[in-house]
Amino acid sequence: MPKINLSHFEAAFLFSVLASVVMGITTKKTQKERVNYGLYCFGCFIVALFGIGWVMKLGHG
């Protein structure tokens, strides 16, 4: 099996996509609600990723 070498950003992005899809599918009933909630969750993950990244950068100088 080939080894996958992902950067931290790529791994976090992949996690965001997969978690958003799962959360959208399992928590909403209609297709439109699933898509909207999945996109909302994905956006929240990405904002948190960049926000926490900047806080860590500012904290370490």
Image (spheres, grey):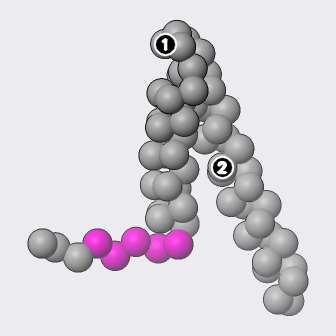
Distance CA(mark 1)–CA(mark 2):
21 Å
| Residue drawn 57% across the image and 27% down it | 27
- Numbered disc total: 2
Q: What number is the disc on residue 6?
A: none
Q: In this view, which residue lies farthest toward the left?
A: 1
Question: Quick check: is 35 in the magenta stretch?
Answer: no
Mark 2: few/some/many CA within 10 Å (<14, 14-19, 20+): some
Callout 1 amino acid: Gln
Disc 1 or disc 2, which is closer to the eye?
1
Callout 2 amino acid: Phe
Judging by the rendered image, the residue that carries numbered circle 2 is: 45
Q: Quadrant of residue 35?
A: top right
Expressed as whole percent of the image width and height from the top left, the position of residue 3 reads 23, 76
Considering the image in quadrants, where does the C terminus appear?
A: bottom right
Q: In this view, which residue lies farthest toward the bottom?
A: 61
Q: Which residues are magenta?
A: 4-8
Expressed as whole percent of the image width and height from the top left, the position of residue 28 reads 57, 20
Could you tell me which secondary element the residue under label 1 belongs to?
A: helix
Q: Quadrant of residue 23?
A: top right
Q: Is 57 rendered above or below residue 38?
A: below
Along the horizontal axis of the image, is 35 left or right of 3?
Answer: right
Judging by the rendered image, the residue that carries numbered circle 1 is: 31
Could you tell me which secondary element the residue under label 2 belongs to?
A: helix
Considering the image in quadrants, where does the N terminus appear?
A: bottom left
| Residue drawn 47% across the image and 63% down it | 10
Q: Is 55 rendered above or below residue 12?
A: below
